[in-house]
Image (tube, rainbow, N blue to C red):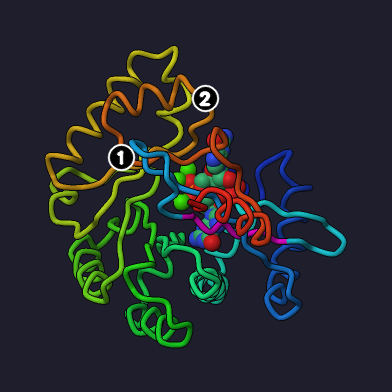
């Protein structure tokens, strides 16, 4: 979906005219999406592989446009990254997700880690640590209950600056993970210097675990390397028992995917959490 988003920003490719019109339309409407209250978050649980207990949730943004209907983040996030709107959207997402987790904790749920996706554009903003700290202060969410999901692309261009930023974010006391791990181009040398806690094994490696020995080998290698580097692993896109069994047998620490729960709206997430965390 990410690649599709990028490709569709070429306005003059033959056959893409209808899409580019849609893009311009989306872009104009996205500008007011926050103030018109059209954005919302869905939450997807992340489970401890060994115990099956929920340990965290990933916040995934949704855009419900009054006429266009639901627009997928795979479509509007690349657009927002391209025109800079992602900074305001990303900040709204972080504040809303932090408020949500704090409110669930106030309602008696055990503290969980709220994972928020961070665009490389946000990551390059030198004031990002202050912005994150302001959101933590404002919402009262302890930093240890917040995780930021970065992609390998944050290191392109200026890896040293990326490492400095990771150190600054980490110093706030929150957790950092590398999302879609294995799909980017970051070298192992950078990985060694990245101050991160978790590797998220991309769902493209998880999908064909049952049929593709290469994917099995890659997943095993990522888990072993992560553990050797003292990093936690989480697999995303887990849809079947077979995939979960393989990941469990190979020591993957956490699981996330439709097999356990789809991304769901806040009210449904609260019910799900209450059920799963009841004694
Ligand atoms: P992602 O961060 O890799 O998120 C995982 C995507 O996989 C989500 O798609 C999720 O709904 C989907 N998914 C979860 N479990 C399964 C499964 O078992 N099978 C399959 N096939 N898919 C599964 P979604 O919500 O459409 O988000 C797409 C992408 O949009 C995200 O990929 C992320 O890159 C981006 N995104 C979403 N919310 C935000 C946000 O708040 N900020 C930023 N910067 N990006 C976001
Ligand atoms: Ca993610
Ligand atoms: Ca991912
Ligand atoms: Ca992905």
Residue at the image position 54 percent from the left and 69 percent from the top:
104
Q: Earlier in the sequence, mark 2 or mark 1?
A: 2
- Mark 2: secondary structure: loop
Residue 93 in picture, x, y percent from top left: 55, 69
Q: Please determine whether, in this image, residue 266 is positioned above or below residue 186.
A: below
Main secondary-structure element of the magenta-colored stretch: strand
Residue 254 in picture, x, y percent from top left: 36, 41
Determine which quarter of the picture holds residue 32. bottom right
Q: Please determine whether, in this image, residue 118 is positioned above or below residue 246.
A: below
Residue 6, visible in the rendered structure? no
Q: Which residue is mark 1?
A: 253
Residue 207, visible in the rendered structure? yes
Residue 61 magenta? yes
**Magenta segment boundaries in residue numbering:** 57-63
Residue 17 in picture, x, y percent from top left: 75, 47
Q: Residues within 10 Å of mark 1 (few under 14, many from 20)?
A: many
Q: Quadrant of the N terminus?
A: top right
The one of 111 and 224 positioned closer to us in this rendering: 111
Residue at the image position 36 percent from the left and 37 percent from the top:
49
Residue at the image position 58 percent from the left and 65 percent from the top:
80
Residue at the image position 31 percent from the left and 28 percent from the top:
219
Mark 2 to mark 1: distance in Å?
17 Å
Q: Residues within 10 Å of mark 2 (few under 14, many from 20)?
A: some
Q: Is mark 1 within 8 Å of ligand 3?
A: no
- Mark linked to residue 119: none
Residue extending furthest toward the right: 67
Q: Which residue is mark 2?
A: 240
Q: Please determine whether, in this image, residue 240 is positioned above or below residue 233.
A: above
């Amino acid at each position: 979906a990410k690649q599709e988003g990028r490709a569709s920003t070429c306005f003059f490719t033959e056959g893409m005219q209808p899409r580019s019109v849609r893009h311009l339309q989306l872009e104009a409407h996205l500008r007011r999406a926050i103030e018109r209250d059209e954005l919302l978050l869905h939450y997807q649980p992340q489970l401890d592989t060994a115990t099956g207990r929920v340990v965290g949730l990933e916040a995934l943004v949704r855009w419900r446009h009054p006429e266009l209907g639901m627009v997928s983040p795979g479509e509007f996030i690349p657009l927002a990254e391209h025109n800079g709107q992602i900074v305001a959207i990303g900040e709204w997402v972080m504040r809303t997700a932090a408020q949500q987790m704090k409110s669930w904790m106030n309602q008696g749920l055990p503290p969980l880690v709220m994972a928020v996706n961070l665009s490389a554009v946000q990551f390059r903003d030198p004031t990002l640590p202050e912005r994150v700290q302001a959101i933590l202060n404002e919402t009262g969410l302890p930093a240890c209950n917040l995780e930021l999901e970065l992609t390998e692309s944050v290191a392109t261009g200026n890896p040293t600056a990326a490492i400095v930023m990771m150190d600054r974010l980490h110093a706030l006391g929150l957790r950092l993970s590398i999302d879609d791990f294995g799909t980017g181009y970051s070298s192992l040398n950078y990985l060694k210097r990245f101050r991160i806690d978790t590797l998220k094994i991309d769902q493209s490696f998880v999908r064909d675990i049952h049929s593709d020995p290469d994917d099995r080998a890659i997943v095993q290698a990522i888990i072993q390397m992560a553990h050797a580097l003292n990093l936690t692993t989480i697999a995303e896109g887990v849809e079947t028992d077979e995939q979960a069994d393989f990941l469990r047998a190979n020591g993957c620490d956490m699981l996330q995917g439709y097999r356990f729960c789809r991304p769901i709206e806040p009210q449904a997430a609260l019910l799900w959490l209450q059920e799963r965390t009841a004694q």
